[in-house]
Image (tube, rainbow, N blue to C red):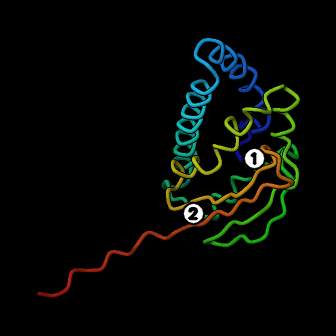
Amino acid sequence: METTEIPTLTKRRLQAQVVGAIFAEMVEQIGQDQARAILDAAIRKAAVAEGREFAAREPGGATSMASFIKLYELWTADSALEMKVLRADERHFDFDIVRCRYAETYREMGLGEIGHLLSCNRDGTFCQGYDPNITLERRQTIMQGASCCTFRYRYDLPPRSEPPAPA
């Protein structure tokens, strides 16, 4: 983690103060469904861009599951997440979140209804920019009422290109 990096929970709280007001205005102007769709698309695009920025910081732009796992120091800083790691190796990063201060923060701010758009949607989408070989399967989140979040990241190695067969 860079020493100048703002803890992600702090960053999300600051962003939510602005985004929450913009979202409320969008709802008033264009309705709940369209406002949610716009917010969802904007946050996903921002997550992909952030993933690219983090990938560019890796030496030679070389990303891996190990470098991705190291990034979790940013997201868990300030006890933002309490996690139970189930598996962490070069192809898997499986864990459950048993306490999510992101969800707590959004609820405290009156934004619990859109918290999944502000944070949860970033989790898998971030990978598209960071390393598209990493994918996320998640069946439930605290943000949407479950007792825990189930994160199952996979690193799928790109297929090897076979040398052309001799003629």
* Left-right relation of 32 to 112: left
- What percent of the width, then of the height, locates residue 2? 70, 43
Vertical placement of residue 134 versus 51, above or below: below
Q: Residue type at mark 1: give it.
A: Trp
**Side (left or right) of 35 relative to 147:** left
Distance, label 1 to label 2, CA atoms, is: 18 Å
The residue drawn where x is 68% and y is 60% is 69
Quarter of the image holding residue 35? top right
Above or below 108: residue 162: below
In the rendered image, the vertical position of residue 127 relative to residue 114, given as above or below: below
Q: Please give the label number shown on residue 120.
A: none
Front-most of residues 4 and 133: 133
- Number of marks in the image? 2
Q: Residues within 10 Å of mark 1 (few under 14, many from 20)?
A: some
Quadrant location, the C terminus:
bottom left
Q: Residue at x 66, y 20 (%)?
A: 23
**Which residue carries the number 2 mark?**
64
Q: Position of residue 84 (x, y in %)?
A: 84, 63
| Mark 1 residue element | helix
Judge the density around disc 2: few (<14), some (14-19), many (≥20) Cα neighbours within 10 Å. some
Q: Quadrant of residue 166?
A: bottom left
Residue projecting furthest to the bottom: 166
Q: State which tag comes first along the sequence, 1 or 2.
A: 2
Q: Amino acid at mark 2?
A: Ser
Q: Secondary structure at mark 2?
A: loop
Seen in the picture, residue 151 relative to 81 is either above or below; the reply is below
The residue located at (52%, 39%) in the rendering is: 49
- Per the image, the residue denoted by label 1 is 75
